Image: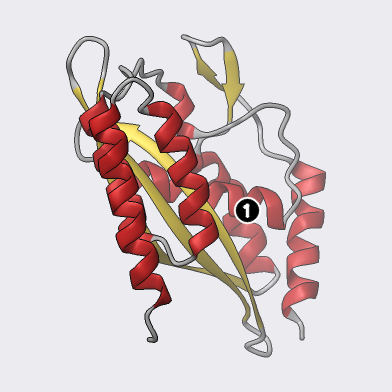
Amino acid sequence: MKVYKAISMVAKDMAEQGISKDRRNAQQGFNFRGIDQVYNALAPALVRHGLLILPRITERIVTERTTQKGAVLFYVVVKAEFDFVSTEDGSKHTVTTYGEAMDSGDKATNKAMSIAYKYAAFQAFCIPTEETAIDADSEVHNVAPLNPDQLLSAFTEFAGRATGEKELKDEYAKAWAALSGYPEHQEKCKDVTGIRIKELKQPA
């Protein structure tokens, strides 16, 4: 399988040339590498060593959040799979990463996809990074805490996606604690958990 040799050769190039960290997060005072810098550094090495990176988004979750000033933010999480494919023999290896980002407009998904790609590259090719270098960190969002209704809604949404009883119970314990002082919400949380557990126990 020549895909691993190709990955190794690209990693060697990245170790020798690196990727400059010249983008600056002025609000929090650190430098980071932008996604365009990663593309520009990787593209020649990928062509030179016959390696393709083919992305595939398998999950996308969008949540609306509110800043302390009352503005709406879209918080997006994507689960992405990247097939690293050798052009010589067609052999491949799949890397899975997650990307998370916030935006007040229509760019949150694009940001999350870029972050997923960037960290897949960082990890697969062992590109050194001194700090958390994600594009979304070039912006800072002060998010207001969720109110009880939002907490219950978020838990209900999670419960509907849960595929295992243990993960559901773990999240239920967190939600119950977060809803301390709101017994009606806690009871609804308990009801949702009970219903979902019954659903999970039903034969497929």
> Residue drawn 41% across and 35% down?
176
Using the image, determine if residue 194 lies above or below residue 147.
Answer: below
Q: Quadrant of the N terminus?
A: bottom right
Q: In screen coordinates, is 148 left or right of 92?
A: left
Identify the residue under disc 1: 121
Q: Nearer the viewer, residue 11 or 170?
A: 170
Asked if 104 appears above or below 70 in the picture, the reply is below
Residue 179: x percent and y percent?
35, 28
Q: Residue at 26% across / 11% down in the picture?
A: 68
The picture places residue 175, in percent across and down from the top left corner, at 40, 36
Say which quarter of the image contains residue 161. Answer: bottom left
Which residue is farthest bottom? 89
Question: Residue at (62%, 53%) from the top-left corner?
Answer: 121
Q: Nearer the viewer, residue 176 or 69?
A: 176
Q: Indicate the amino acid at tag 1.
A: Ala
Q: Is residue 136 left or right of residue 40?
A: left
- Residue shown at 75%/39% (left/top)? 128
Is 67 left or right of 121, judged from the image as shown? left
Nearer-the-camera pick, 155 or 180: 180
Note whether 95 is above or below 76 in the view shown: below
Tell me the SS state at disc 1: helix
